[in-house]
Image (cartoon, rainbow, N blue to C red):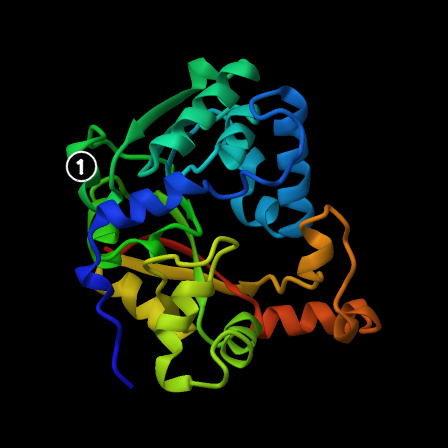
């Protein structure tokens, strides 16, 4: 199987993609920028991805320093700040940062959050290098052309005692199989390209890497980190046609599945590979 040349994708192409449609921007029909809009975006995000609060463990970081790589429109940013963390957030998308800044200001957390614009591949040229208690990146690093560069950059902000929490996409997942059988028409020899194109709500994402558990652990290790915990989460169970109309109707093959069976399926074939790590000695 020929690997796609994601390493040759210009970072500007990635930036332009996320500027056209920042992640989760359509999670509400309320006026963009209003409190009602942001409240609804938050509620919808954690309804659909209920594992995020447990993974991020927002209350744990009260009074701590958090470096968030890829803040998007600021849902997790606000949660960290709401629980008392001092947050430094970075994003490649100017549009996402514009909304995130507005959001933080609206909720009264401007004194707890610093924003930086730019690529995580050159993080140390943007953000002053200092140790953080938590380095957090949820669903971001797999979308940059050179993920190893990002981890090497993050290593500069890690000290003994730093916790690193990263979510990347899981190769052995229900989502990958679904993409292969639907959009990919079974053409497994084009799997990486097809997954990239259909990994997000807006088709055409220019870069999407996926990882196995072992591959993710090896990735962390070669970049100066050691995995403490690796878990798999999240199968999206809803019919897309209903979901985009803000209705939560499960696909027929999930509708009658017992909850325990569905959660067991998520733990093995979920789309989100959640990595908790620490700097290697």
Say whether residue 35 is left or right of residue 262.
left
On-image quarter of the N terminus: bottom left
Can the viewer see residue 135? no
Between 227 and 91, the one lying in front of the other is 91
Question: As displayed, is residue 10 above or below residue 90?
Answer: below
In the picture, measured across the screen, residue 169 lies left or right of residue 57, that is left
Instruction: Note whether residue 139 is visible.
Output: yes
- Tell me what residue is drawn at x 44 percent, y 52 percent: 139
**Quarter-of-image position of residue 207:** bottom left
Quadrant housing residue 235: bottom right
Counting from the top left corner in percent of width and height, residue 194 is at 41, 72
Residue at image coords 55%, 70% = 175
- Alpha-carbon neighbours of circle 1 within 10 Å: few (<14), some, or many (≥20)? some
Q: Could you say which is closer to the camera, residue 97 or residue 270?
A: 97
Relative placement, left or right, of 259 versus 73 is: right
Residue 125 screen position, x and y as percent: 15, 34
Taking 240 as reference, is 92 above or below it?
A: above
- Coordinates of residue 132 in the picture (x, y in percent): 33, 35
Tell me the residue that label 1 is attached to: 124
Q: Is residue 225 above or below residue 123?
A: below
Q: Residue at x 72, y 48 (%)?
A: 245
Rendered residue at 42%/33% (across/down): 96
The tally of labels here is 1
Secondary structure found at label 1: helix
User: From the viewer's perspective, is 242 left or right of 127?
Assistant: right
Please name whichever residue, 132 or 200, is drawn nearer the observer in this view of the structure: 200
């Amino acid at each position: 199987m020929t690997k796609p040349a994601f390493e040759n994708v210009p970072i500007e192409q990635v930036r332009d993609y996320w500027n056209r449609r920042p992640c989760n921007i359509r999670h509400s029909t309320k006026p963009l920028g209003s409190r009602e809009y942001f409240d609804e975006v938050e509620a919808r995000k954690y309804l659909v991805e209920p594992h995020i609060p447990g993974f991020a463990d927002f209350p744990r970081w009260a009074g701590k320093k958090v470096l968030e790589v890829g803040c998007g429109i600021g849902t997790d940013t606000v949660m960290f700040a709401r629980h008392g963390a001092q947050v430094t957030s970075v994003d490649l998308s100017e549009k996402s940062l514009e909304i995130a800044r507005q959001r933080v200001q609206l909720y009264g957390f401007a004194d707890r959050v610093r924003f930086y614009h730019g690529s995580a591949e050159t993080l140390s040229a943007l953000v002053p290098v200092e140790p953080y208690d938590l380095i957090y990146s949820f669903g971001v690093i797999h979308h940059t052309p050179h993920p190893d560069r990002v981890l090497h950059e993050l290593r500069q902000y890690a000290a003994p005692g730093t916790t690193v929490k990263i979510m990347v996409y899981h190769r052995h997942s229900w989502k990958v199989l679904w993409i292969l059988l639907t959009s990919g028409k079974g053409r497994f020899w084009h799997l990486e390209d097809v997954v990239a194109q259909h990994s997000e709500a807006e088709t055409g994402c220019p870069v999407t890497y996926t990882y196995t558990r072992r591959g993710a652990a090896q990735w962390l290790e070669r970049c100066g980190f050691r995995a403490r915990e690796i878990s798999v989460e999240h199968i999206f169970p809803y019919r897309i046609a209903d979901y985009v109309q803000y209705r939560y109707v499960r696909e027929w093959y999930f509708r009658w599945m017992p909850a325990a069976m569905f959660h067991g399926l998520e733990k093995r074939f979920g789309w989100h590979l959640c990595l908790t790590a620490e700097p290697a000695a």
